[in-house]
Amino acid sequence: MNVLIFEWKNFGIEDICDAFKDMGIKYKCISTELMRERKNEEFDNIFENEMSIKYDCVFTFNYSPVISNCCRRFNIPYIAFIYDSPLVSLYSYTVINPCNYIFIFDKTLYLELKNAGINTVYYAPLAVNTDRITRQLREADTNPAISNLCNKYKCDVAFVGSMYNEKHNLFDRLKNLTPYVSGYLDGIIQAQLKVYGYYFIEELLKPDIIDALQKSVPAEPNKDGVETASYLYAYYFIARKLAELERKDLLSAVSKQFNTHLYTPNATPELPEIINCGPIDYYNHMPYVFNNSRINLNISLRSIRSGIPLRAMDIMGCNGFLLSNYQADFYDFFVPGEDMAVFESKEDLINKCDYYLEHDNERRQIAANGFGKVNEFHTYKVRLKEIFDVVF
């Protein structure tokens, strides 16, 4: 088999290439930002030039309309493995192209599209390169520099991720809203913060609210897609504001009681008790963070409706202890309390941090169980075999 890969700054691209090598699959990987376009003649020419070689399929992380149209033109299967949510390109008209095999990590989103008659979508949870991570972690036993690095990462609780508190984020650009509209938005945000497992914001954005938002900061749907203005406001404006508020609230509570490290590109002066370590490199350092933090938090974007985020899979794949908010898809593959742990509220989060820090052997066994399941069922080699069984 011979695979053509397109990518642009995707997490996991090195791991997917490693998996192809291990599986004896030939591939060529092209990095180009043009794949993010809806239409682009320069990309079309790049693709056409590559078609002088016989490829069995094209692979990307996330979904690219311009690649789908090229694959349709050359009658070649297009495999898109989705790990982002929201992903507005999934609402492009091109998703119905018969060349498409779109594997979505969020079962709720997959079912929504499938039940709408989109027959090119499939469900596939995300994956981890446990072979690479295991090699890295073993190196800490023989390399003093790595061992010292691991000591630096030791802490009670850690969180890796964006705080979404950047100046001029989309939600905070909404200006000159009436007191009614501001109050309505605040009300539905506060209600959503109390509910895990169901994202209802889009349903509550009434036409008069949408009109007010459009007058403040217009959100224009793509002309070649079926996404609505309510979708854009719910998933790109409000979901990220929810993440900012929730992560700030939970991490503030945790850091007041436990030694807490935060790995993020964002400044956090509003969290004086937390140790903000700055951003962390995904490949070279993040495995050591997850392996050496006694508890690793997953606080999901609410736009991930039921799926297991990549962060959560990575934590377990590093033999780290995962404490996550509720996501329904966990229950299809893992047993909370045996493979990982789930918190249901801020108070429950604090209680579970306290419990698992006091019960070290139980915490280590749960981390080992989670790693065992990821290593057996959720590696890239396992997932690619499942994907190829569908496509071919």
Image (cartoon, helix red, strand yellow):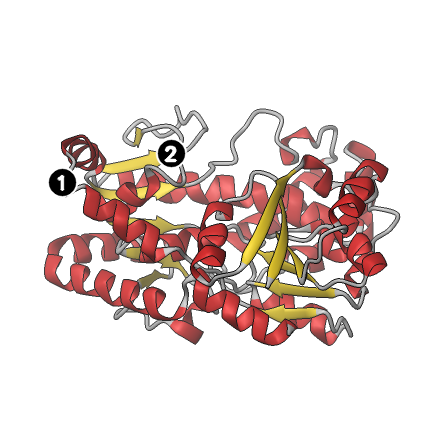
- Residue 129 is drawn in which quadrant? bottom left
Q: Position of residue 35 (x, y in %)?
A: 71, 42
Other residues around mark 1 within 10 Å, as few (<14) / some (14–19) / many (≥20): few
Q: Locate the C terminus and report the quarter of the image it occupies.
A: bottom right
The residue lying at 74 percent from left, 34 percent from top is: 177
- Residue 98 is drawn in which quadrant? bottom right
Q: Earlier in the sequence, mark 2 or mark 1?
A: 1
Three-letter amino acid code at disc 2? Ile
Total numbered labels: 2
Q: Position of residue 181 (x, y in %)?
A: 72, 42
| Depth order, front residue of 235/14 | 14
**Residue that badge 1 annotates:** 142
Is residue 326 left or right of 164 when viewed as pictured?
A: left
The residue lying at 23 percent from left, 36 percent from top is: 153
- Residue 302 makes an appearance in the image: yes
- Residue 323 makes an appearance in the image: no
**Residue that badge 2 annotates:** 280
Is residue 357 left or right of 208 when viewed as pictured?
A: left
| Depth order, front residue of 203/93 | 93
- Residue 274 is drawn in which quadrant? top left
How far apart in space, not on screen, are marks 2 and 1 (Cα)?
23 Å
Three-letter amino acid code at disc 1? Thr
The residue lying at 58 percent from left, 54 percent from top is: 303
Q: Position of residue 359 (x, y in %)?
A: 12, 59
User: Element under label 2?
Assistant: loop
